Amino acid sequence: MGELSWTRTVLFLAFLVLVWGLCWPIYKIALNYTPPILFSGMRTLLGGILLLLFTIPRYKQIRLKDTWYIYLISTVFNVILFFGLQTVGLQYLPSGLFSVIVYFQPVLVGIFAWLWLGEQMSGMKIFGLILGFLGVVVISFKSFSGQLSVTGIVLALITALSWALGTIFVKKVGNKVDALWLITIQCLLGGAVMTAAGIHTENFSNIEWTIPYMSGLLYGAIFGIPLAWLAYFFLVRSGEASKVATSTFLVPLIAIVTGTIFLHEAITIYLVIGLILIITSIYCVNHKPKQPYASSAQIHETK
């Protein structure tokens, strides 16, 4: 897959950040009416079923015999571990704090992309990655008060690690499979595994079919999982993984702003400072150093 145009890249990123930013408060509210693993599995499985309606005409591009391992590994890291641990972890920590730890992922992606993908790692990029994570920390500073759950912190860290590894894996081998089939299969397979695990360990009758629950389920099944992950994988496969990952630092910001608008939470100095840090971070990671000026004599010598 070639590089996306600047306009498409911006539109995809804006869509991704907005959708994922809204996920945190929507899922947090929905979890008041459902067991976590069942909720994670059902919204993922439903998203895969909806995607299947669009991928069936492309059945010749699945090539399951040659690429089954790609679908399987991507499912484990990007769905089962990422969605499953994320949903369970939200039960142990405030959503703001949990998102802060999960969004250590762009820093991990930057390191892994340098080690395994050969992406350039400059001092400016390192500074930008650290700055972005600090911005997320500052934005959710108020979430650090109170008793912290060690279990929640560990789950958040594993969630970040699995997401980072899944992103690098897709960047490295994703061009060998069709993007639509990759998302569809990992949603179907991962959703089925998590739903089965939920049925085995939780009680299906504990689901309260309220409007907040149904809204969270449908939002995840349509926007939060299939459409958002399609946008994310298109971006990762067409550009530098570390640059795309860094842009997701904006997701916790959207989550906080959403709370400010709809839940009437006050705009704090932490929000303003965090926003400045994140914007600076994205600039640093995406900044391309100017090429040294070559004189006409030097150009002539190279011909």
Image: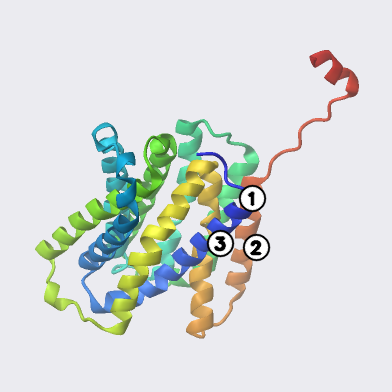
Q: Residue 6, which numbered label?
A: 1
User: Label 1 amino acid?
Assistant: Trp
Q: Which one is closest to the eye, mark 3 or mark 2?
A: 3
Identify the residue at horizontal 56%, vertical 46% (top origin).
243
Question: Residue 298's x, y, as percent?
Answer: 85, 19
Q: Is residue 14 left or right of residue 32?
A: right
Label 1 element class? helix
Name the residue tied to disc 2: 276
Q: CA distance from mark 3 to mark 2?
A: 18 Å
Label 3 neighbour load within 10 Å: few <14, some 14-19, many 20+? some
Identify the residue at horizontal 26%, vertical 42% (top origin).
72
Looking at the figure, which quarter contains the C terminus? top right
Q: Residue 115, which numbered label?
A: none
Q: Which one is closest to the eye, mark 3 or mark 1?
A: 1
Whether residue 145 is situated above or below residue 184 in the rendered picture: below
Question: Can residue 265 be seen by looking at this rendering?
Answer: no
Identify the residue at horizontal 34%, vertical 46% (top origin).
58
Whether residue 230 is situated above or below residue 289 in the rendered picture: below
